[in-house]
Each structure stands twice: as structure tokens, then as C-alpha cells.
Amino acid sequence: MPTDIQRFLQEYIDAFLSTYPSYGAASGLHQYDGQIGDYSREAIDARVRALAEFERRAQAIDSAPLSAQERLDLALIERSLRHEQFEWTGLRDYQRNPLAYSPVLDVTQYIKRNYAPLSERVRALTEHLDGVPGVLAQAREHLGGRPIPRPFIETALDVYRGYLTFYEGSLPAALNGLQDRPLFDAFLRANGRAGDAVRDFVGWLTDDVTPRATDDFAIGERLFSQMLATGELVDLPLDRLVKIGEEELRHNREALAATVAQIDRHRAPAEIMREMGMEHPSAATLLEETRRLLDGLRDFLVERDLVTIPSEVRPIVEETPPFSRWAFAMMDTAGPFEEVATESFYYVTPPDPGWPPQQQEEWLTKFDHYTLKDVSIHEAYPGHYVHFLHVKRAPSQAARIFTSYSFVEGWAHYTEELMLEQGVDPAPKFRLAQLAEALVRNVRYLVAIEMHRGAMTLEEATRMFMEHAFMEELPARKEAVRGTFDPGYLNYMLGKLMVRKLRADVQAEQRERFTLRGFHDALLALGAPPLPLARQALLKKPGRDLL
């Protein structure tokens, strides 16, 4: 018989996954396959009312008799519902950002992992595709009649055109081996309707939304602070956060200058960085070099005993799907509830072969041999891939479902420094690459705050990436544009600083008992909660200092 707390936790989880069934399906809970979610005004209003009722019930629970895990799970639920309330009633991206609807159009989960017979997956895929026109109609209803920020439209057009290319080309081709002709024909009809809806949506964004676009994308100081407080449980004043970011930027710029002097003290950092950017694989060899890198990084982790690697399954390196090509590289790990198909994908984005040669070369400068190693640390070993192998083993459903931006990206960013300090590559150019990536996160942190409190333009943010992170104009502008619709991307650096502080505090408490592997395993065993909750779980005296 479940206790009251267990009943409450399960009821909230069931309601959450019913609201976001695509998230449940992607997590490996295949009872949600084929479901796409309801974004009608009535459904959103009902969800907001349900969240208020769940919050009332959570506040009435006596935490004294709960186990440590139950207290953590309850805290995760409370954080989840308050942040979702903020997203629906405060941030309101569903009314201002076409990208808010794009994740539910991703149907790759049905074809990239063999978790069930192909015919069963195609039935679910067909059902999912049948829901696409309805979701896009709801999107137009919510987004219509108000000016949309120009960079949101620019990125959304790239994303939805990518989906259209995928629906029309790659998706039918991936199912050519299906023997059930009636089932394949039903899929083709649903896929055609979905493709038509996406094409119409792209046309609407181009012809109707673009002419009334606005350059005003900032969410303002109040909402930015609420985003951090509800999402990451961080309530520090923005001015203090800016000072912390400026100090970290200064520290890394000084370290970069010292590293450049090791290479050639007569040349400027920008010159050395530009030259290093020329040392990259070709577009044709990029994926194979990445595969070799992953093998070497995994071997180093095992040799140094830095963290448990819970699985022998290796990530599969593939080219990024067309609808996600705004990212240079990204990890797609099998969901925490996936029991059959455990394939995980490390996506890397070569330049578009249709670009002019100069633009292709500019894109490849981000994949110099040293930066590729640092990015692969972040994405795979011991970054996201190793982390989500641990999440799969987390002790509760809540711990596997409810993750925080600052933990997920903070851990991955922290591991870049960890591997450097452990000697994964003693070359000064690798140190330079690690610092360059750290500077990108420093700039993300600062421009996220400054752009969204109205103190910095998109053009100024682009220049800051170029000047302080030594990026070429194309990737610098893409980074700045991302900050307009992803204000939370300050969490890479914010999370890293909190992990670094937590490690120092745990070491101070444990003294001679402290080991890196022990700390890393204990941290990752929690799942990915907001880091203030991780402090409470791992420290006898967590204190209030997060950074």
C-alpha cells in the first residue's frame, strides 16, 4: 500500500507525463508513444489550475517522517511545479516564441532506437504525425496577432525547415524496409499531412509573422530573476551575479594570455587562436576523428579512476539531424527508463555543403583538434553521456525525470576543467582550447543577463563573443542569437561554479576520506537536481554560499 507521500509523488509524475507525453516517450516510457500533447487554451488553463492544487497539497505534507530520498523527491516536485507555473504564467514563451512548439515535432525516437518491432513503432509514429497539424494550429492561435522577436523567427525558420526536409526525405527513406504495405501507406498519408502543416507554418512565419517582427526580445530583470529562482533555486541579485561573471572572465582571460605566451610570447592571443582554428579535420573526416577521440577519453577515465562508467555501451557518432543543425555538437543519450534499446548518439555538425567554401571553412574553425577534444569531454566522457548513464540508475522516478539546467550543463562544463587538471592532454594548445570554451561560457553568462535586462543589444553580444571568446562572426552571431531565446544558457558557467564550490566544501568536510571518484559518484547518484538541493544531500552543513 503506497504511503501518502508516495501516492502524491506518483500522481504528480503521472499528471506531468500526461501533459508532456513526448518527454515521457523519449525518456523510455513507451506507454506515451504516439501522444503529442494538447496546447489549447483550455488545456493550458487546466494545467495551471492543477499546478496550483499540487502546490497546495505539497505544502501540506509533513516532511519530518520522510526518508532523505522522499524529501529530495518532494523538493524536486515543488521545484518542478513552481518553474512550470512560471513558464506558463510569467515567461509565456508559448505566446511569444515559435520554437516553444518545435520539440514535439521530433519523431526520431521512433526510428533511431529499436525498442520494439518496427511495425509497432511505425504505428506510434503515425499517430504522432497525425497530431502535428493540430499542435501547429494551436501554435498559430497563441502566437498570432502579436509581434515576435526577430531572432526567434530567424531560428524557428531554420528549425522548421529542417523538420520539413526530414519529413519529406530522411523519414520515409528510413522506413523503406517496412514489409506491411497498408501500414506504410498510412504512415505516408500522416507524414504528408504533417509535412503540409509544417510547410504552411513556415509560410505563415515568413509572410505573416516576419513583417511584424520586433527587435525586443528581453524578458526583463524580474522574469530573469524568477527564472533562476524557480528553475535553479538561485536567488542572488543580478548585480552580484554580473560581478562574479566579470571576475571569472578576467581570470580566464589572464590564464589565456599566459598560455599564449607559452606558445609564442611575441604574438597576440587572437592570432594564435585563429591559427589554431585552421588545424581541423576536413568535413569528410570529422566524424571518424571524433570516434577515435571518444575511445581515448574513455580509456583515460578508467585509468585515472575519476568516475564510475555504468555501462559498456559506447555512444554512436553521427551527423546532426537537419532540424538541430544550429548546434555544433550535442549528445542524445538513451532515456533513463529505456530498457531495451540503449543506443546513444553523439551528434556532430559538419558545415552545410551548400555553403560557400569560405563559410564552410569558418564553421570548421570551431572543430580544431584541441577544441574537438574539449567538446567531446563535455558531451561524452565524462560529461553528458556518463552523467545520464548515472541518471538511469537514480533511486526514484522523480530523480530520473526532473533535472535542472544548471546541474546538467554545469557538470559537463566542470568536467572540461577536471580533465585538464588530471592531465588528459599536456599540450598548451589544449589548455588554450579549454580556456576558449570557458570564455564562450563566460560570455554566454554575461550576455544572457545583460541582454535580458535590456543593457546589451544582439549586435553588442555578437561583438563580445568575437572579442572575448575569439569567435568568427558567423558562430559568434549564432551564439548571441541563441541567448535571445535561451536566457538560461548562463547556467553552463553558473552550474560549473556551483559544482566547483560543492566539491571544495565536500573535500573540506571529508578531509583525508575525500576522493574524486567518491565525490563524482555521490553527486551523479542524485540524478540532476538543482545544485542547492545537491548541497543539502551531500553536506552536513550546506550553508548559504552557492558560489
Image (cartoon, rainbow, N blue to C red):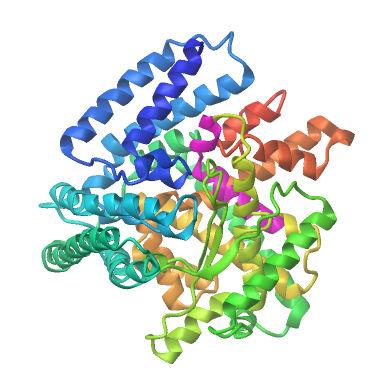
Which of the pair 379/451 is nearer the observer? 379
- Counting from the top left corner in percent of width and height, residue 15 is at 35, 28
Occupied quadrant, residue 212: bottom left
Q: Quadrant of residue 20?
A: top left
- Locate residue 465, reporting x and y percent: 48, 68
How many marks overall? 0
Whether residue 415 appears in magenta in the rendering, the answer is yes
Left or right: 107 with respect to 131?
right
- Rendered residue at 56%/54% (across/down): 246
Horizontal placement of 202 versus 523: left or right?
Answer: left
**Region of the chain picked out in magenta, as a range:** 397-417
Question: In x, y percent, where is residue 259?
Answer: 73, 72
Residue at the image point whose x is 62% and y is 33% from the top: 534
**74 w.r.t. 341: above or below:** above
Residue at position x 25%, y 24% in the image? 49
Query: Is 69 located above or below residue 517 in the figure?
Result: above
Do we see residue 494 in this rendering? no
